[in-house]
Amino acid sequence: MSSAPTPKPTACLALADGTVFYGKGFGATGECVAELVFNTAMTGYQEIMTDPSYAAQVVTFTFPHIGNTGITAQDDEAADPVASGIVVKWDPTDPSNWRATGDLQDWMARRGRIGIGGIDTRRLTRAIRQQGAPHVVLAHDPAGNFDIEAMIARARGWKGLVGLDLARDVSCTQSYRWDEGLWAWPGQFGTNPEPRPFKVVALDYGAKRNILRSLASSGAEVTVLPATATAEEVLAHAPEGVFLSNGPGDPAATGAYAVPMIKALLERDMPIFGICLGHQMLALALGAKTVKMGHGHHGANHPVRDMETGKVEITSMNHGFAVDSQTLPEGVIETHISLFDGSNCGLRVADRPVFSVQYHPEASPGPQDSGYLFTRFADAMRARRGGMSGGNRPTA
């Protein structure tokens, strides 16, 4: 009896250590070089692909069903995908969801992003956990022609994320107003007809749309400024609070221009709220340091403990750098830690309305345990307007 011939691989993933994975390609053709990370979320592949924090990264999904809910423009967190490519166990299937307006493979092809299916993602994830996030080259060629030695050499020659400022690349180029609120049944994002009492400037280091929606829904009149905005440009909008957004790359590199701006704002005793890269920027401005993590935190099921209340929240995370808690100066209090590895996940300044967290309280995808932080930010602005001491820790 004769067996059917094995299909020729149309995609290849080459790691800098020489390991090679072959599979079936989808999406755009060509190749890209990036850092490889794994994400443990069970939903939200489109939001993950369009999260600017994934710039210069290829995402391995540990959940095997990727693509089965299709694509809808409502789920884009940025105008275009930012992650360089994706690695999945099973080839994406036809979409089966009432919200779908297209399928993942066509969407990726139109947006210039590469995918590879048929990969043992458990094996790949174990390798990342044990060895750290590797540099890789991902290639898709329908003819199945790959120069493996050249791909490995390119992966080895890539400098990686350390020292790389990517926030400038994914940030907006000019200021704009944001009015859209959070999603609500029967399936749309709303514009809150009620007046928004607080003027907030959001620094865009790679802000997800759902973060801006969360700010608007908490009562903020949001003006978004580019990552390179100066303190004078921020203060020209007369904000009652400043928000520091998520974003990609090495915080120390972005801090070259962001930290002086934040330091100037800290002198104003103004409410400041940061998340993800914004958390790291704030920590640097306060005198702490950041470090590159081995494989980072990427997923929607990360437990975090509030050190001041004892409460445990399940959070959404996406970061490859972390604040070194041992370098937090006097007067800066560690408020949250990861229950996975004990790394820093939050801080606040004693006696001032300034706080930040490493995770994503807006989720999208992920749980909504931490949405109260946007209310806490609004409470801080309300307290300041009412003449209360900035030292009172805002309540949820």
Image: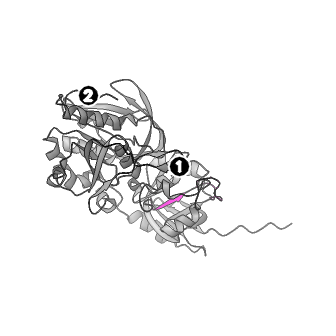
Q: Nearer the viewer, residue 69 or 114?
A: 69
Residue marked by disc 2:
393
Image position, residue 339 (x, y; %): 42, 32
Amino acid on which disc 1 is placed = Gly
Residue 284 in which image quadrant? top left
Q: Residue furthest top?
A: 309
Name the quarter where the C terminus is drawn. Answer: top left
Image position, residue 229 (x, y; %): 21, 56
Query: Disc 2 or disc 1, which is closer to the eye?
Result: 1
Q: Is residue 99 magenta?
A: yes
Name the quarter where the N terminus is drawn. Answer: bottom right
**Quick check: 374 left or right of 186?**
left
Residue 117 in which image quadrant? bottom right
Q: Residues within 10 Å of mark 2 (few under 14, many from 20)?
A: some
The residue lying at 45 percent from left, 37 percent from top is 368
Image position, residue 363 (x, y; %): 44, 43
Amino acid on which disc 2 is placed = Arg
Q: Residues within 10 Å of mark 1 (few under 14, many from 20)?
A: few
C-alpha distance separating marks 2 and 1: 36 Å
* Magenta part of the chain: 83-100
Residue 267 in which image quadrant? top left
What's the mark number on residue 187?
A: 1
What's the mark number on residue 242?
A: none
Q: Nearer the viewer, residue 106 or 225?
A: 225
Judged by its main secondary structure, the magenta piece is loop
Q: Nearer the viewer, residue 291 or 232?
A: 232
The residue lying at 31 percent from left, 60 percent from top is 172
Of the numbered discs 2 and 1, the one sitting upstream in the chain is 1
Q: Residue furthest right?
A: 1
